[in-house]
Image (cartoon, rainbow, N blue to C red):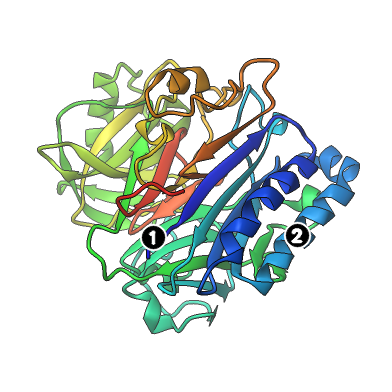
Amino acid sequence: MPLLSHASTYITRSRNPALVLNYLSGTVPALLGGSAVRPTVLLALGICPDDADLARDHSSALSDLVKYVHSWTAHADVVGCITAPPRVGGNASDALSCALAVFPSTAARAFRVDYDEDGRVRVGRWHAFGPQSTGPQETIEGIRSEELVNKNLITLSASLTLPNAITRGRSLLNLHTSATPFLTGLPHTLFFGKRIHERGCVGIALDADRPGEVDVKSDFAGMRRVDGELYTVTEADGNLITGLSGEKPTHHFLQAARKAGAAPAASLVEDQGFALGVVTDASEGTVTQMHSIISSDPSRGTLALEEGAYIPPGRHVAFFVREPSPSELGHDWLKRPARPTISFLNPSYVNPNAAYMDFSAMQKAEGDFSSTPHLEDSSATDITLPNTFLASSEEGFSMTEGGRCRIGDAVGSMSFGEAAAK
């Protein structure tokens, strides 16, 4: 039995949640009704977090949608969230989305972690991926703490940081969900069974005893490596890089900035598009994580990465810069994948109003979504992406040992098995 039997994402240009309900009511019963074991369902409802008008105008449809999701708990364990939708047609508020994944195997376990975290990650502060002291109390529900150690974990977090419990898994893919005060009246909205939570994280733990069953990767569209230089992180303090190849990081950073054509300012900030990427295979140039550089301190020689980031000592890194023109999101992963895939996508920072997906290009490629309408056509209103669970958040995503990534257009993904999902 495959770990993941179904993955799909429904996106509609209509602002009526009733269309999402129609999609789910036409899809979910067949997935849950015939299962020999109690499956686990992962759900991400994509609704613009600032759309107070939608919450007011369609409150009844939203209520019906949540009630329908709660009804699944009679047949399945349910984990989910409300977060921002992938941007289609130029504005996030122009679309609603629903990402759905079904794990039919007893090898999948739903769980929740409740922990005290104010969500404010300060420069230099240790967080979940850094060296740990005695931290806040964590309460785990649905699984024992020791069982998380060797699992592949997919989680949805209401905080900018993560509980220590989930950082010990074999692999991790986490979405930091969008705030929802204007939609639900809660800071964040997480689903766990029939309950709705405003803090902590919920997730699915997957057995990792089948080699090759799960593949975790990341992609950073629009980021260009400045040069062929490779450095080693020799000292780090939270999201501060304090030593790079035994020297002050600003020395190497200013050299890289000049090579990239930036003005040699004393302090270079996030707006200039520089980032530090972790290179795991020097010969192939494989980059597994990347974080924006938000400031440099020439007097101390330190570099500050985006909040929630952490690159531990010993990692090999290189400098990257964002291309001046917005990237075209022709990601290979966005074409119909051969393997069912869970993907978390960051908004674009180069052009915040850009549409995420060029469906016309996808439809021209063999095996893409050629039977679906073109969303940029005025007559098209919705599309279904088979084999793909696609969710988004302006708060970014986290992966194993990587801290939070908010690089624009970046995507973290987890793929399953060899056969395509049905």
Q: Which residue is mark 1?
A: 172
Which x, y percent locates residue 308?
Answer: 46, 53
| Residue drawn at (59%, 73%) of the image | 116
The foreground one among 6 and 243 is 6
The circle on residue 401 is none
Q: Which residue is mark 2?
A: 68
The foreground one among 78 and 150 is 78
| Residue drawn at (42%, 35%) of the image | 336
Which x, y percent locates residue 36?
Answer: 51, 73
Res 118 visible: no
Establish if 90 lies above or below 164: above
Quadrant of the drawing holding the N terminus: bottom left
- Residue placed farthest to the front in the image? 34
Q: How many marks?
A: 2
Q: Secondary structure at mark 1?
A: strand
* Quarter of the image where one finds residue 51: top right
Q: CA distance from mark 1 to mark 2?
A: 29 Å
Establish if 299 lies above or below 91: below
Of the numbered discs 1 and 2, the one sitting upstream in the chain is 2
Is residue 104 shown left or right of residue 265? right
Which x, y percent locates residue 99?
Answer: 58, 47
Q: Secondary structure at mark 2?
A: helix
Circle nearer the viewer, 1 or 2: 2
| Residue drawn at (41%, 24%) of the image | 330
Establish if 314 lies above or below 332: below
